[in-house]
Amino acid sequence: MTDHPLVTFDHVSVAYRDRQVLLDVSFELWAGERVALVGPNGAGKSSLLRALAGLVPLTAGRVLLNGQPIEELGRAAIARRISAVPQASLPFSMRVEDVVGLGRLPHHDPIRGPRPADRAAVAAAIERVGLGHLLGRDARELSLGERQLVLLGLAVAQATPLMLLDEPTVHLDLRHQVSTMELLADLNQRDGTTVLAVLHDLVLAGHFFPRLLVLDHGRLVADGPPGAVLTEALVRDVFGVDPALVALVASARPA
């Protein structure tokens, strides 16, 4: 383990015009962790990911990556350290394999372009995510769930120490939700990838992630293992639902 965290949020606040979306948020992520970021709609989860990736200005505080302020890193340097899986949106027409290949752009030789190692990384990512049956297809013509898997393949090909995911299971059926969670666990455990994922499903978060961060109205209100964080009081107060409903869903999920 290094002497400093991989990520440090130091009293971070973010505002869009007059609307505060993050308020005095502080936490650390260490290399090799697998963490789920949960909270109700509008809690600031996606804004936290954008702040971590250096995509929004801070109104207060600091974000450090390997001890270095994120604003001191260029976009190429950030792209070699952080991969991001957004919700399934593709702005232009591309074949599936070409979308996955975009993950290698931060690693290309500026003169020679992609190398054999880049092509091998793309092929390995396609196999690992299970995209072989989609090769040659226009990614924009795929279902939302299939597009989500293609974007996950892009991030796997990017091969960064830190992977950020914004609701990676939102368009997936139950089988693909579970297989995606298993893939993230495998990337974390076998490859050492640090994973921070925004999830709405508390059952998936609690089952597959050893640590949860809970945001509510822009504030970090809980941080710890699922058993300590997902108390009846927190589920009721933060999410506004009967905790028994979460337990019922959990009992219906595969182990």
Image (cartoon, grey):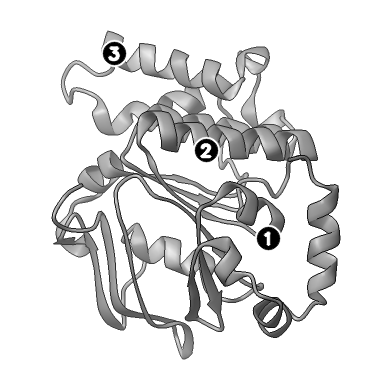
Q: Residues within 10 Å of mark 2 (few under 14, many from 20)?
A: many
> Considering only order in the chain, which callout, 2 or 1, is on the residue closer to the N terminus?
2
Taking depth in this image into account, of 91 and 77 the one nearest to the observer is 77
* Residue found at x 37% / y 66%: 51
Q: Position of residue 246 (x, y in %)?
A: 79, 64
At numbered mark 1, what does the secondary structure look like: helix, strand or loop?
helix
Determine the CA span between mark 2 and mark 3: 23 Å
> Considering only order in the chain, which callout, 3 or 1, is on the residue closer to the N terminus?
3
Q: Position of residue 110 (x, y in %)?
A: 17, 26
Taking depth in this image into account, of 8 and 104 the one nearest to the observer is 8
* Residue found at x 73% / y 40%: 255
Determine the CA span between mark 1 and mark 3: 38 Å
Image mark for residue 184:
2
* Residue found at x 70% / y 40%: 177
Residue occupied by mark 1: 202
Q: Position of residue 121 (x, y in %)?
A: 38, 18
Going by the image, does 213 lie left or right of 200?
Answer: left
Residue occupied by mark 3: 117
At numbered mark 2, what does the secondary structure look like: helix, strand or loop?
helix
Image mark for residue 104:
none
> Considering only order in the chain, which callout, 3 or 2, is on the residue closer to the N terminus?
3
In the image, residue 101 above or below residue 185: above
Q: Position of residue 141 (x, y in %)?
A: 71, 30
Going by the image, does 126 lie left or right of 133?
Answer: left
Q: Amino acid at mark 3?
A: Ala
Going by the image, does 34 lie left or right of 73?
Answer: right
Q: Amino acid at mark 2?
A: Leu
Quadrant in the picture for residue 235: bottom right
Going by the image, does 193 lie left or right of 253?
Answer: left
In the image, residue 88 above or below residue 126: below
In the image, residue 194 above or below residue 141: below
